Image (tube, helix red, strand yellow):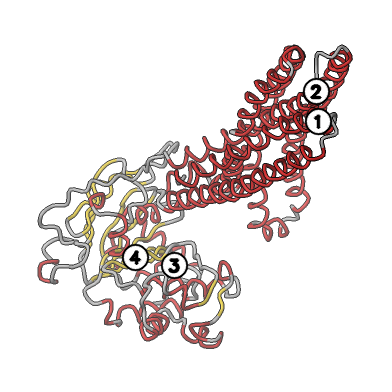
């Protein structure tokens, strides 16, 4: 929060409050000295003064509302920006820990709760206590004997507020968690709508959503019903207070111990006192929900990354932020080295990777093959430093991966993910995600290598529209666009994490041939993760994974003769007619 605008908002609020509290005193003087004594000149004089004070109060209130709303919206914008930046830097473990649905809720709904309360703080939470205390003093000055009524009404109002807070606060806390659940079910329903239709599960999914929606609604109804009951009860107390003041005050006027103007001023102050009490009670109802939201926001902002960076690079590191060593020096150390690396996902019983060791040099192609759940993608995630290994060490050009800042590592190493993600926009904007200043020539070259130039030209060229998720392209086309995006990047290590799986065998073979002949790939390390033997045939080195263990390493010919797991993969794919294509 900017302190100067916030301070100015408080000062203008104070000015508004002074004007509001001064008006009843002027009214009392107008009635006592003007109306009752039929002094027209005095009435005009006091009337103009009242108009001036009311105008000042209106101006102060307008400026206060402007500054308060501006500051609260800025706080919301800053919180959203910080949350988004934090989430973008989360490792895989933190993403799994929170989940997508709650991250969306905390970035939207919870931030709105906080910024709404901040506005109320700069408007009502500061103003109501000012009026409450000052109006009590001024009311006592006007009619000390009438203030006895406050000794009855204020304790009743306090008890009412405390009761509502006691029962409503836990309900407001649970509403935020139930909001997460609604978002989760709704998101699953949208993303899995085809699966639901395929298995005739629309009614089941509708019931799931109805259940969580009903649970959320019932909790909300209970919470807001309690709050709703508070205001009629307080209005009743306010009305009874006015009745008591008029009856007692009328008797005092009858015996001439109180002026009519003073009674009118006292009633006005009483209304201000009780109205302020009601507004303050409304704030106390809002605060628990905002407190719960603030805690949920802080849980994200204060969560440390499970990926650790030890920024103590060796003096002879081959990786630098702006320059790279000549190839003659780079050959002194492997481009990538795994030293007895093991990894276990949080809460998992067995290791996802168990004692993995290998090296890979520049100007070569290394392939990783294995069945589903063998640990292929996990190995790539560790190389990209999305997770921290449980044991062992990963080195890039002789430098521990946890000593390379994330932004530098991800510029040096680029990964085409197993799950294709395209952003709404154009083909050009998607390719420029990898390299913002990429020229048209570079992008078309990448599209040519990725076997994507023909359908991109047919769709309208680099400025062809891409819908959210790329759903205006087929699965194979989206895969090739993702591969082209990876090739646009100016990197030293190119990783393709099972990105050829959606391609037919001919396109797969053409793409691999284009990669091998591409001058851009000279002196670079290419890592291909695949399940098909045909995709890894020509790799310089093939790593065979099985249940998280490295059970084979060598060329295709060597593994085909000596490695049982590789032979089983070949045999299963030959039966399907997919192992003889190169």
Image disc number at residue 323: none
Q: Can residue 405 be seen by looking at this rendering?
A: yes
Mark 1 vs mark 4, CA separation in Å: 81 Å
* Secondary structure at numbered mark 1: helix
Give the label, 3 or 2, closer to the camera.
Answer: 2
Mark 2 vs mark 4, CA separation in Å: 79 Å
Measuring from the top left, give residue 169's x and y in whole percent: 65, 27
Look at mark 1 in the image and give the residue it sits on. Answer: 31
114 and 265: which is toward the camera: 265
Mark 4 vs mark 3, CA separation in Å: 13 Å
Give the label, 4 or 3, closer to the camera.
Answer: 4
Measuring from the top left, give residue 436's x and y in whole percent: 38, 73
407 and 83: which is toward the camera: 83
Residue found 76% across the figure and 33% down from its top? 27
Residue found 17% across the figure and 56% down from its top? 398
* Secondary structure at numbered mark 2: helix
Badge 2: residue crowd in 10 Å (few <14, some 14–19, many ≥20) = many
Look at mark 2 in the image and give the residue it sits on. Answer: 263
83 and 531: which is toward the camera: 83
Mark 3 vs mark 2, CA separation in Å: 83 Å
Look at mark 3 in the image and give the residue it sits on. Answer: 499
305 and 167: which is toward the camera: 167
Q: In the picture, which quadrant includes the C terminus?
A: bottom left
Measuring from the top left, give residue 132's x and y in whole percent: 66, 26
Image disc number at residue 414: 4
């Amino acid at each position: 929060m900017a302190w100067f605008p916030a301070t100015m908002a408080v000062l203008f609020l104070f000015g508004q409050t002074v004007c509001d509290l001064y008006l009843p005193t002027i009214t009392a003087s107008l009635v006592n000295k003007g109306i009752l004594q039929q002094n027209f000149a005095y009435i005009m004089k006091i009337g103009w003064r009242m108009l001036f004070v009311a105008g000042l109060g209106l101006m102060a209130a307008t400026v206060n509302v402007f500054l308060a709303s501006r500051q609260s919206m800025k706080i919301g914008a800053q919180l959203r920006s910080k949350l988004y930046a934090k989430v973008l830097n989360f490792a895989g473990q933190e993403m799994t820990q929170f989940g997508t649905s709650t991250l969306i809720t905390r970035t939207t709904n919870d931030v709105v709760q906080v910024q709404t309360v901040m506005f109320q703080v700069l408007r009502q939470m500061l103003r109501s206590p000012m009026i409450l205390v000052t109006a009590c003093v001024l009311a006592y000055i006007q009619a000390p004997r009438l203030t006895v009524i406050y000794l009855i009404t204020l304790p009743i109002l306090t008890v009412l507020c405390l009761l509502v807070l006691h029962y409503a606060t836990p309900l407001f806390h649970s509403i935020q968690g139930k909001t997460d659940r609604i978002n989760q079910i709704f998101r699953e329903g949208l993303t899995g709508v085809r699966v639901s239709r395929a298995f005739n599960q629309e009614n089941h999914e509708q019931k799931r959503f109805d259940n969580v929606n009903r649970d959320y609604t019932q909790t909300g109804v209970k919470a807001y019903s309690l709050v709703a009951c508070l205001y009629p009860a307080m209005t009743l107390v306010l009305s009874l207070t006015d009745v008591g003041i008029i009856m007692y005050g009328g008797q005092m006027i009858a015996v001439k111990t109180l002026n009519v103007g003073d009674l009118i001023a006292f009633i006005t102050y009483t209304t201000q006192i009780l109205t302020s009490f009601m507004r303050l009670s409304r704030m106390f109802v809002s605060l628990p929900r905002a407190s719960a939201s603030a805690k949920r926001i802080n849980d994200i902002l204060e969560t440390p990354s499970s990926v650790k960076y030890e920024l103590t690079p060796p003096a002879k590191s081959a990786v630098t932020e702006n320059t790279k060593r000549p190839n003659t020096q780079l050959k002194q150390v492997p481009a990538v080295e795994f030293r007895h690396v093991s990894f276990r996902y949080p809460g998992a019983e067995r290791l996802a990777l168990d004692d993995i060791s290998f090296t890979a040099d520049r100007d070569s192609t290394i392939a990783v093959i294995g069945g589903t759940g063998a640990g292929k993608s996990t190995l790539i995630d560790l190389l990209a430093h999305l997770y921290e290994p449980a044991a062992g060490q990963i080195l890039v050009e002789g430098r521990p991966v946890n000593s390379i800042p994330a932004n530098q590592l991800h510029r040096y190493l680029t990964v085409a993910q197993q799950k294709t993600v395209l952003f709404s926009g154009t083909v050009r904007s998607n390719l420029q995600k990898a390299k913002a200043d990429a020229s048209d020539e570079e992008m078309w070259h990448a599209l040519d290598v990725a076997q994507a130039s023909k359908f991109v030209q047919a769709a309208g060229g680099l400025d062809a529209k891409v819908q959210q998720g790329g759903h205006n392209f087929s699965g194979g086309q989206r895969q090739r666009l993702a591969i082209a995006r990876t090739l646009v990047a100016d990197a030293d290590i190119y990783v393709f994490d099972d990105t050829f799986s959606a391609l037919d065998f001919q396109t797969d073979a053409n793409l691999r041939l284009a990669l091998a002949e591409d001058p851009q790939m000279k002196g670079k390390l290419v890592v291909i993760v695949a399940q098909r033997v045909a995709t890894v045939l020509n790799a310089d080195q093939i790593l065979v994974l099985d249940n998280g263990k490295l059970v084979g390493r060598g060329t295709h010919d060597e593994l085909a003769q000596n490695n049982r797991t590789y032979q089983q993969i070949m045999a299963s794919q030959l039966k399907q007619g997919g192992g003889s294509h190169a």
